[in-house]
Image (tube, grey):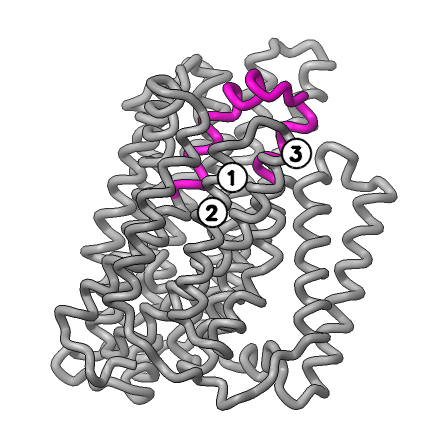
Amino acid sequence: MTGHFTDRMRWLALVVLSLGVLMIVLDTTIVTVALPSIRADLGFSETSLVWVVNAYLLTFGGFLLLGGRLGDLFGHRRLFLLGITVFTLASLGGGLAHSQGLLVVARAVQGLGGAVVSVVSLSLIMNLFSEPNERAKAMGIYGFVCAGGGSLGELLGGLLTDALNWHWVFLINLPIGIAVYALSLALLPKARDQANGAGLDVAGAITVTGSVLLAVYAIVNGREVGWTSVRTLGLLGTAMMLLALFIAIEARVRHPLMPLGLFRRRNVAAANSVGVLWAAAMFAWFFISALYLQNVLGYSPLQVGLAFLPADLIMALFSVGLSARLVMRFGLRLPLATGLLLSAVGLALFAHAPIEGKFLAHVLPGMALLGLGAGLAFNPLLLAAMNDVDPSESGLASGVVNTAFMLGGALGLAVLASLAVARTDRLAAAGLDSIAALNDGYRLAFLISAGCALAAAVLVMVLMRARGPLPAHEAAPGAAARDAVNG
């Protein structure tokens, strides 16, 4: 893919891909800020309002694997353009929506387009930058966009909703999407499909997509209908059956959607296992810490957004700077384990946050450690998940690691939020003050999150392959370079 591409063109292509990813990342937080306005305008109930979020999560999580594999089969550039088109048109539909049903459908279609853009953009970056030093820098920029986009979405969502109306949190995607599409046509390299004419594994696609869709649906609704309810257990059981059927199909089909040999690659398997645990910890922290700041410390929504800025800025700066240099000097294992340990300490600090907490003493230290830990760990974790695979499987590997993040985050948030609520209810029933009961529930969730991050760090040290650092001047493009940087 990169033979005829100049260095300048590759870095410009990275800017275009980053803009596309930024649009997807923005959408995960910008809509959340507008939910109260959406509810008031369209008449959503508390129960039905969650589908403005869940419809997106459902299709986003369900189509990550399929989107990545379709990119491998039919061309990453082609699927990226398709994903941008679908997402932008769905954003237009959401911005013009004047009924609950139309908005929920638009959000579901946004999730489909967002899934394709997320997995294919990561594949394009990995294929554009095969030399280890440049790849580490490019992935650092990717991490910078992912980290900075979340906080930007919160601030932009508040500004657009207050200054204009909630429709503009969707309509803002139109100029971005049009610009990304036009620049992609000019800058993204055309490449021959890398699957050598292999056909799509239809049975595998149906079973794995159905399995993930059912699992995500059961997770996001488990708290509402009950984790031990017939519906939740039935959906999870059906999802497991479909997953087992998918594995059986993949072991026999000539051109599998997901070659099972992928998980025999040590770093790939380790990175995805670590990704599940770390996403569970980080998703829960982001959600529950916002509740702690609002419900216990009495912060306004704007103050909550500003409170997260130190963590987001530190995460972004270390993703694009220090993380890449550490990877080139020490390999993947040490920076990843260090970042996870710092995250665990930051979460442990939140687990001791008092009712009368002060920002500088009780919030900022944990925020700073979590920002630093995530900034160090994000880059090597993605590299570990992607470096061992051939270009023809990069879309698949991207889909697998994104799915691991998605399911780990959704499950961790659902379970830890439920545990926090259960502890709060139990303490309140015992006569404890309501704010104190809330705080104890949040502290339990933070403590378990810290345990998940610590377990992820241990897995890295035990499972991930360790190799000596690769000097930048010895780096060479191609498969040998991909293998050399692993570690």
Residue 379 covered by magenta stretch: no
Q: Give amino acid for label 2.
A: Leu
Q: Secondary structure at mark 3?
A: helix
List the residue tagged with mark 1.
Answer: 93
| Res 292 visible | yes
Rendered view: 309 above or below 304:
below
Nearer to the camera, 22 or 334:
22
Residue at image point 54% right, 80% down: 262
Residue at image point 34% right, 77% down: 486
Q: Are marks 2 and 1 in contact (CB under 8 Å)?
A: yes
Percent of width and height locating residue 263: 56, 77
Q: How far apart are the two marked residues, 2 and 1, measured between alpha carbons?
A: 6 Å
Nearer to the camera, 57 or 421:
57
List the residue tagged with mark 3.
Answer: 101
Percent of width and height locating residue 244: 76, 71
Q: Give amino acid for label 1.
A: Gly
Q: Main secondary structure of the magenta part?
A: helix
Q: Which residues are magenta?
A: 26-54
Nearer to the camera, 15 or 226:
15
Rendered view: 312 above or below 470:
above
Neighbor class of circle 3 (other Cα within 10 Å; few <14, some 14-19, many 20+) is few
The answer to which of marks 3 and 2 sits earlier in the sequence is 2
Neighbor class of circle 1 (other Cα within 10 Å; few <14, some 14-19, many 20+) is many
List the residue tagged with mark 2.
Answer: 89
